Amino acid sequence: MGKSVQKITDKVSLIASADTWIEGLAIQQLIKTSELNGMQRVAGMPDLHPGRGYPIGAAFFTTNKIYPALVGNDIGCGMALWQTTAKVAKVNLDKLAKKFTHIELPLDESWFSIIESSKAAKNITIKGYDSALGTIGGGNHFAEFQAIDEIYNQSALDELGLSRKHLQLLVHSGSRGLGQSILVEHIAGHNHNGLCEGDADFKDYMSKHDEAVRFAELNRELIAKRFLEAIRASGERSLDINHNLVSAKNINGCDGWLHRKGATPSDKGYVVIPGSRGDYSYLVKPVFTALSDNDLAVQESINSSLFSLAHGAGRKWQRGECHGRLGHKYKREDLYRTALGSRVICGNKELLYDEAPQAYKKCETVISDMVDAGLIEVVAKLRPVLTFKTNGGC
DNA sequence: ATGTCC
């Protein structure tokens, strides 16, 4: 701890060293959000960047009420890591890149029975959004094949059953149109005012929210299975972690509601913090200091990080300005390959530029800020092999 | 972020 934990105000802290680039607007949004009624504490992560009104890459702890607008439309968005049976040594990039031609369409009849049984098992009763299941979506969502590049903690890797011989698959997606519809309905009735505990609409929102979280998990599972089928491999999920949600949490003896907006939980075991498509991702183990709960330093660390971590490298440039900044220097063809030797499949021109590695911070700085803050230790570094965004859309 | 905006 120390150097990479900044106190912004009494309520607001930021996990970032002084030389980590954070946009001023994002800090302003962080402070503004801390002034909402019932807000107890706000913690910015080292990938903090501006959003529409509220910043992304932050955790917000309230008492007595929740703010659905803080969670946003992509309820349940998160990262799932699958180990495939495919061998890294046997990867042929040209061949691999050709296997994903129909991967964006709604799942066909051959999937219907698994969709029905999975929905029942997860108590998902909502109808009307099944065509989104198994689809990645836009924005920063992706499916990426990766190889374990460097190992720092072999026993942790063993615990997860991960081997560097096997190709890994990281899926980043959420609840698609379902989460969007839940937010739209909430805003129509309550604007950005939030909901008080005890209100009928509070219960109603939380129940829909929780279902959207399960829907998002199922979506990632179906995306993974679909990509596995496309490469004629099977696989097993080693983790699935949501970074957009609100849930009940006791923080330093206080019962309340923890909102995470692009903030990875540090209380759910191992997590993957992805870099941009041209950078490494990091498998990390959250650290819990083995001191008594009464220890002031521990309480302070909990207050300043709110059981949360970065959810990625963090945008350096705003969406939409990237084509202008990169267009002169890079042709579209230049962006289908990365400096780490990986391939990119992205048929949408704006997305190709918006999600370019240059638009993101270096993931290593985000990781080292959290290491310095005493929040994580790095287990392994994952190298991108092929990143799938979308086939069409140009 | 969004079966994405005409």
Image: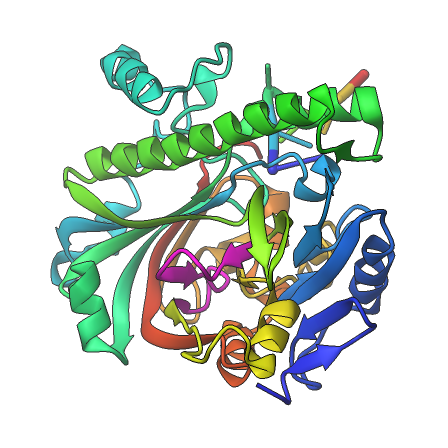
Going by the image, does A56 lie left or right of A389?
A: right
Residue A184 position within the rendered picture, expressed as x and y whole percent measured from the top left = 73, 24
Residue A322 position within the rendered picture, expressed as x and y whole percent measured from the top left = 69, 57
Q: Residue at x 40, y 79 (%)?
A: A290
Tell whether position A151 is magenta.
Answer: no
The answer to which image quadrant residue A153 occupies is bottom left
Q: Quadrant of the C terminus of chain A?
A: top right
Going by the image, does A133 lie left or right of B3?
A: left
Q: Residue at x 82, y 72 (%)?
A: A10
Going by the image, does A305 lie left or right of A170?
A: right
Residue A320 position within the rendered picture, expressed as x and y whole percent measured from the top left = 73, 49
Query: Image height check: is A78 above or below A300?
Result: above
Query: Image height check: is A296 above or below A353?
Result: below
Examine the rendering and report whether any part of residue A83 can be seen: yes
Which residues are the magenta region?
Answer: A263-283
The answer to which image quadrant residue A45 occupies is bottom right
Q: Residue at x 56, y 43 (%)?
A: A247
